[in-house]
Amino acid sequence: MNVLVLHSQVPFVRGGAEVLVEGLVHALSVRGHTVDTVALPLSWNPTEGLLTTALNWRLLDVSSFNGRGVDCVICTKYPTWAVQHPNKALWLIHQHRQAYDLYGTPLSEFTPDKASRAVRERVIEIDRRGIQECARRFSISNNVRDRLKKYSGIDAKALYPPVPRDGLKPDSYEPFVLSVSRIDGAKRVDRLVRAWEHVTSDLKLVIVGDGPDIDKLRSTVRTRGLTSRIEILGRVDDDHLRGLFNHCRAVYYAPVDEDYGYAAVEALTAGKPVITAPDSGGVLEFVSHEHFGLVTSLDPRPLAATVDRLSDESFARVLGIDGPTATRNMTWDTVVKSLLGA
């Protein structure tokens, strides 16, 4: 088949969505399909940009290119499903959450004024209409599926993305906790840094990732006298990150109501327990307290006490060693067949 994977790209930002799209394109290609990515930039400042981008997708003719017909398009993020095509499939990464579950919080750009409410209402209608047009509807997790049902009244089926990194395995359980995520408020890495003042064991913290709050996080580490115990690496290459997963004691991943959580799934594949929170969303589809990890309050002292429990290497091994069984059946064969309707 000739397939287009549709993606909303925020310029200069790379995260799990980009990893997912690249993995899907590669999986389609190696299975004999002709595939490419179509991406349009997405901006929501001002919020009217959300409507402009949706209109661009609606007006975009993706029926054929260079004399070659397009058999299927796969939509991923807002507002790719605004595109018109007779064979649209959905693999929902997430809707524009600022219009839904994040509305009314500091993480949303929408305000109570009339103009902002009008834009939000249009976003909701674009979702409802465009997603209902999709012939097959899947989400990357039960958490995303449940949000779609709750806010848009539309059903979908969870279709988990496979682990994006190969070579993950429990080589060792060295005395450091690994955090891998974008450095911003929603990922709550700062909560772990503040808790480290109360960690009494010899465990160290290694932080991988970049984002708008990284300089603030580095400043916090310095001002609290934690530079000998916390290392912030920023972005690292794949080989380096693979090694960190394979040799760490545990992985911290406790964002606010996460869609899915690549870092948690990679941790399980590497046989490492995950430290997460009761409100971390998709992570909890794999991790429960003392089953593949520890679920804890992110207040400094209880979080520190949870970290200290993992100073016992044998305890960490028991929690994490069966993690690969939780990810074994997530395959690209299943994803490709589902999305293409095979």
Image: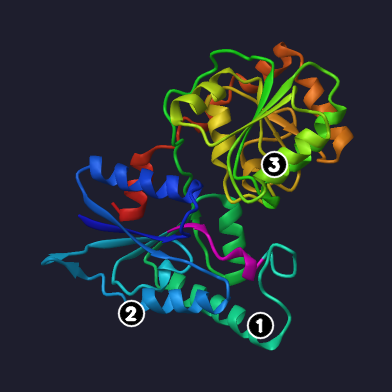
Asked if the stretch drawn in magenta spans residue 93, the answer is: yes
Q: Residue at x 51, y 74 (%)?
A: 50
Residue type pointed to by label 1 = Arg
Asked if the residue under mark 1 is in contact with the one under mark 3, i.e. CB atoms within 8 Å, the reply is no
Q: Secondary structure at mark 3?
A: loop
Asked if the residue under mark 2 is in contact with the one under mark 1, i.e. CB atoms within 8 Å, the reply is no
Q: Which residue is mark 3?
A: 254
Write down the quadrant of residue 75 in the picture: bottom left
Q: Which mark is residue 59?
A: 2
Q: Residue at x 72, y 45 (%)?
A: 216
Asked if the residue under mark 3 is in contact with the one under mark 2, i.e. CB atoms within 8 Å, the reply is no
Q: Earlier in the sequence, mark 1 or mark 2?
A: 2
Q: Which mark is residue 117?
A: 1
Q: CA distance from mark 1 to mark 2?
A: 24 Å
Residue type pointed to by label 2 = Leu
Q: Position of residue 112 (x, y in %)?
A: 73, 80
**Residue furthest to the bottom:** 114
Q: Secondary structure at mark 2?
A: helix
Q: Which residues are magenta?
A: 91-100
Depth order, front residue of 329/103: 103
Depth order, front residue of 138/21: 21
